[in-house]
Image: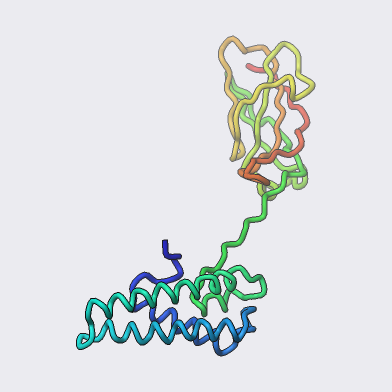
Amino acid sequence: MTPSYIPAPDADFNNWLNNFSTLLTADPTAVGETAGTALVLAADVTAWNAAYATATNPATRTAPAVAAKDNARVAAEATVRPIAIRIRNNAAVTDAQRVDYGVTVPKLVPTPIPAPTSFPIIGLRAATPGVHQLQYTDSDAPSGKAKPFGAVGIELWRSVGTVPATDPSQCTFYGTATKSPFRSTFITADAGKVCTYFARWNTKSGPGGMAQTGPWSAPLSVVIV
């Protein structure tokens, strides 16, 4: 398959190839190449230009002329493709130079989002029958509403029982809250029991594409009404 940066139509390929060769001949060392490489490509470009002119001229366009043009293109592509790949992958070549040459500009590899180092502070806003309305802030900025860098919300874990839980391992995952305040609901049979909450920040992705979590919050225990 022809790489996307090499145009498929012959007319576009002709313009692209001649521009590429002209730039390379003018200053091959600017993109990490040599004068010898530029000369080899220039020879293939000269052969292509002649074959292309013959095949596109109505007076000389014949089946053999078209075949010769196609063969000249194959040869030119075979020479230019590895040069273009080297220019694309050369860290010393600027994106502006790549654009001038008409080669693909490599995409930046995103920096993995690190795990949060702060923890959420969970607070109770209201307790109504079967519902706790909760809110969270960040331990590094308790007076604001912002989440730490990279965090999309909190993992909320809770334990419902007759006594408060003392460790997140005693809880089960309830859900992810991305906005504050948020609700935690219960069944009628839970009335009079104690719900203990633990939470931690989580990210959408991280190293290896895996979501990251931060340290646990302090527990919050609230009677269910």
Q: Position of residue 217 (x, y in %)?
A: 76, 33
**As drawn, 213 above or below 173:** below
Quadrant of the drawing holding the C terminus: top right
Using the image as rendered, state which of residue 198 and residue 85 is in the foreground. 85
**As drawn, 194 above or below 157:** above
**As drawn, 208 above or below 155:** below
Quadrant of the drawing holding the N terminus: bottom left
34 vs 76, left or right, is right
138 vs 58, left or right, is right
Identify the residue at horizontal 60%, vertical 29% (top origin): 175
Q: Give the colouring mode of the picture.
A: rainbow
Q: Residue furthest left?
A: 59
Q: Position of residue 148 (x, y in %)?
A: 70, 47
Quadrant in the rendering for residue 195:
top right
Identify the residue at horizontal 61%, vertical 43% (top origin): 204
Quadrant in the rendering for residue 62:
bottom left
Quadrant in the rendering for residue 196:
top right
Q: Position of residue 104 (x, y in %)?
A: 52, 68
Q: Position of residue 26 (x, y in %)?
A: 56, 90
Using the image as rendered, state which of residue 137 and residue 113 is in the foreground. 113
83 vs 162, left or right, is left
Identify the residue at horizontal 73%, vertical 44% (top origin): 116
Q: Residue furthest front?
A: 64
Using the image as rendered, state which of residue 211 and residue 179 is in the foreground. 211
